Amino acid sequence: MTTIRRAAGLAMFLLGVAPGVQGVELRVSRQALQRTLERQLFTGPEGRYYLKGSPRTGCSVYAEDPEVRFEQDRIVVRVKTHAKLGTSVHGACLGITLAPVSEVSLAPEGEGETLGFRDARLERISEQKELNFLLGPFLSRTVPSSMKVNAAELLRKALEGSTATSGYKVTLDRLKIHSIQIQGDDVVVDADGDLSVK
């Protein structure tokens, strides 16, 4: 009986289904968002994302070292950019080399089960038009789409071990995000959902 109470208590705690509770509060840390971005996007050699060219081409543009921070109600992503712009001659790039730091800020939003991002603003970008032609779409579209976090998947993975620890299979049937806000070093997601205990 104690095991049943533990499993039910865990389920009620996770999704806030206890009497008088309207939902659950999930906290996603800044570090978790940064890891998500690194794992989804910066998967090239040495943790780089190539916007143009590759490690083997003379002329190339790549971003690296993403850093996520929070400023008021926005998420700021900062990346270091390295660009060799010009003409490739025998494996070398004849032209200019640039290394600007670029930043985009995003507003968090809920999309069903997913923590997403909207309203991308280019906060800091290169002064070189040729480089901005590549950086603009990368920062305003590619970065936000690579940071999305499916909150339901995270909870489902956390519940996978419930049978081994409690003897009961606890599954998440539904999750709906209602609101998202930044508090301190976390993105706080207010959601509700349904759990099954078997």
Image (cartoon, helix red, strand yellow):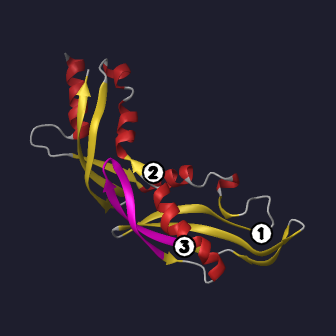
12 vs 137: above or below: above
Residue at 17 percent across and 38 percent down: it is 17
80 vs 31: above or below: below
Q: Quadrant of the N terminus?
A: top left
Residue at 36 percent across and 53 percent down: it is 115
Q: Quadrant of the C terminus?
A: top left
Q: Earlier in the sequence, mark 1 or mark 2?
A: 2
Q: Is residue 52 magenta?
A: no
Q: Quadrant of residue 86?
A: bottom right
The residue carrying mark 2 is 32
Q: Position of residue 99 (x, y in %)?
A: 67, 74
Q: Which residues are magenta?
A: 103-122
- In terms of depth relative to the viewer, which is nearer, 99 or 54? 54
Q: Earlier in the sequence, mark 2 or mark 3?
A: 2
Residue at 57 percent across and 67 percent down: it is 79
56 vs 125: above or below: above
Residue type at numbered disc 2: Ala
Q: Position of residue 18 (x, y in %)?
A: 14, 37
The residue mark sitting in front, 1 or 2, is 1
Tell me how far mark 3 sits from mark 1, CA to CA. Answer: 19 Å
Residue that extends furthest to the left in the rendered view of this protein: 20
- In terms of depth relative to the viewer, which is nearer, 190 or 131? 131
Residue type at numbered disc 1: Cys
The residue carrying mark 3 is 136
Q: Is residue 117 magenta?
A: yes
Q: Position of residue 140 (x, y in %)?
A: 49, 68
* Residue 113 relative to residue 36: left or right: left
The residue carrying mark 1 is 59
